Amino acid sequence: MDYWERLFLYNKKLLMPRVNQLLNWVMGINFLCGIVFLLTIVYEYGFRISAAEYNLIHTVYHTVWVIFLVTTTIQIVFRQEDSSFKFTPWTWILTILLYLTLLPVVFKKPEETTGVYWVWVFFHHAYYKGTILVLLSFSQLSGILVRLLGKRTNPSLILAGSFLVFILLGTGLLMLPRATYHGISFIDALFTATSATCVTGLVTVDVPSTFTLEGQILIILLIQIGGLGVMTLTSFFAMFFMGNTSLYNQLMVGDMISSNSLNSLLSTLLYILGFTLAIEGVGMVVIWLSVHGTLGMTLQEELFFSAFHSVSAFCNAGFSTLPGGMGNPAVMQGHNLLYITLGLLIALGGIGFPILVNLYETVAYYLQAGKFWLLRRSGRFRKKVHLYNLNTKIVLVATVFLLIGGTLAIAALEWNHSFAGMSVADKWVHAFFNSSCPRTAGFASVGLTSLSTQTLLLMVVLMMIGGGTQSTSGGVKVNVFAVVLINLWAVVRGTDRVAILRRELSHDSIRRSNAALILYLLLAFLAIFLLSMLEPEAGLLAVTFECVSALSTVGSSLDLTPTLGNDSKLLVILLMYIGRVGAFTLLTGLVRQEKKRNYRYPSDNIIIN
């Protein structure tokens, strides 16, 4: 063995363990710095600070910046192929952007007459440096959280726990002095944070008069996090910027977002985030065009109003910054475009991300096919037989049927009742809007207490059905409801096979759908029973409406929410949490799963009728 071989073995056996230990320490330091940086931001924007505290805060920012520079350099110098931290292309881009913050330090401020001056100002700006540090902090925190999946922890418990953590964080943030005008109690802050994170919309306080601009920004951030899903955002940051997820992690994340394969996992996450930002961005522009110059707001206020309501509608949250919500007299006349836009955003958010991805792939296929035939390229174009999967077909058909059927029914019931005095166009628009909202949005353009009993009962059914699976909506889901009805029709016809659209439904899908509906009805009945005891003076219809609205994460109420006592608020909070996480998710996480048995008991029949 020559000198170089001995040196290689010495390096591998003795030095590499030390290097790996150093890299682990560096990752731990980055994790702590990320927490400190985010907490400092909360302190700066959550409290009213003095000049001395302001200087101390920016000293912390500068220290975190220096530490990130040092630790990133160490990771580059000592990085190993088998290290738990891997540099993805986007990690390199983020690293380069971090190093560019050194330009104003290395070079002096140029003269304003030169073109280099604006480049220097851009990289010296606090917003640029702050954005880079925020991305680094989130990527570090996401990497640690996603590794929990690698511990083989129950994914259902991780999902439920992540929502609980964000609810508690949101509660603390909403209680900060600068989040409200006159303060807020813990129970009301917890209620609002739960309603926002669970994209429900029920509130015990008036949002515009209680929460400041900072508080409203916190609410919309919680809505966006809750609508996308905590694990979706966490997994995106971990995979996009760190690329350090194990095979087990990827399998769990793929199951949560319904990805077809591991190869398309990151692309599916990008689709979800891309669809969300694109749809909300277009919705924001259209909403701004519909309200510009009509509400007496400044341009900044109009833009925030548009962004808030676009996110709230697409995430099916139902929060509004207008006093009285979307029934405010300022928007009731001459704003049909606003109501139509909100209704369409609600529908898009309610059909589910897998359906949006499937629709995108279908449109891309047709564009590719059109390009092929127009250019007359040589070769054969590979045709796809099944562009839409069965889940997409069921959700789209059911959604269109519920929207059209609900619009016609509400228009017929309220034409000369709560819609009296409106023009014909306004009546149809408000019928469409109020048909979209019960499917877990929570907005209302007319007072729900002014609606007829028949309309309210119809809304209860719409709230119970909800939207599509893997969407921002709640309820038992249109997929489940459709399977239950199809199975019922098959039983009535006496067939032993349940089929729809030339596809036979699996036995497991039927069993789970029936179980999901029964579980929902049991929880709803139990909640109505308990709330009727806690609120004996409330009417049964109001109590039923409140419980179904909370469990389906809708956010509609017959003016009962602000009058609830603390015990009733806790019950509604629990219903909103169960409705967003999913009763099935909680049960599968808490109940021990039985192993597959290799034997069967003798079958027997039960007398049904």
Image (cartoon, rainbow, N blue to C red):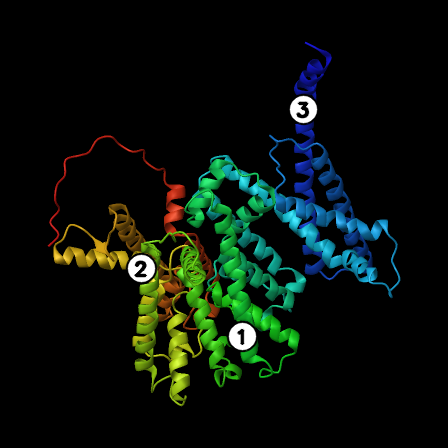
Mark 2 vs mark 1: which is more N-terminal? 1
Query: Which label is found at residue 287?
Result: 1
Q: Position of residue 321 (x, y in %)?
A: 56, 72
- Left or right: residue 200 versus residue 11 is left
Residue at 41% in and 42% down: 589
Which x, y percent locates residue 230? 52, 51
Q: Give the answer, above or below, for where 179 lies relative to 427.
A: above
Residue 162 to residue 417: above or below: above
Give the residue displayed 34% in from the left and 82% down from the top. Answer: 414
Q: Would residue 483 be found to the left or right of residue 420 on screen?
A: left
Helix, strand or loop status at disc 2:
helix
In percent of width and height, residue 546 lies at 39, 66
Residue indicated by mark 2: 394
Q: Earlier in the sequence, mark 2 or mark 3?
A: 3
Distance between mark 1 and mark 3 Cα atoms: 58 Å
Q: Residue at x 48, y 86 (%)?
A: 333
Q: Which mark is residue 16?
A: 3
Secondary structure of the residue carrying tag 3 is helix
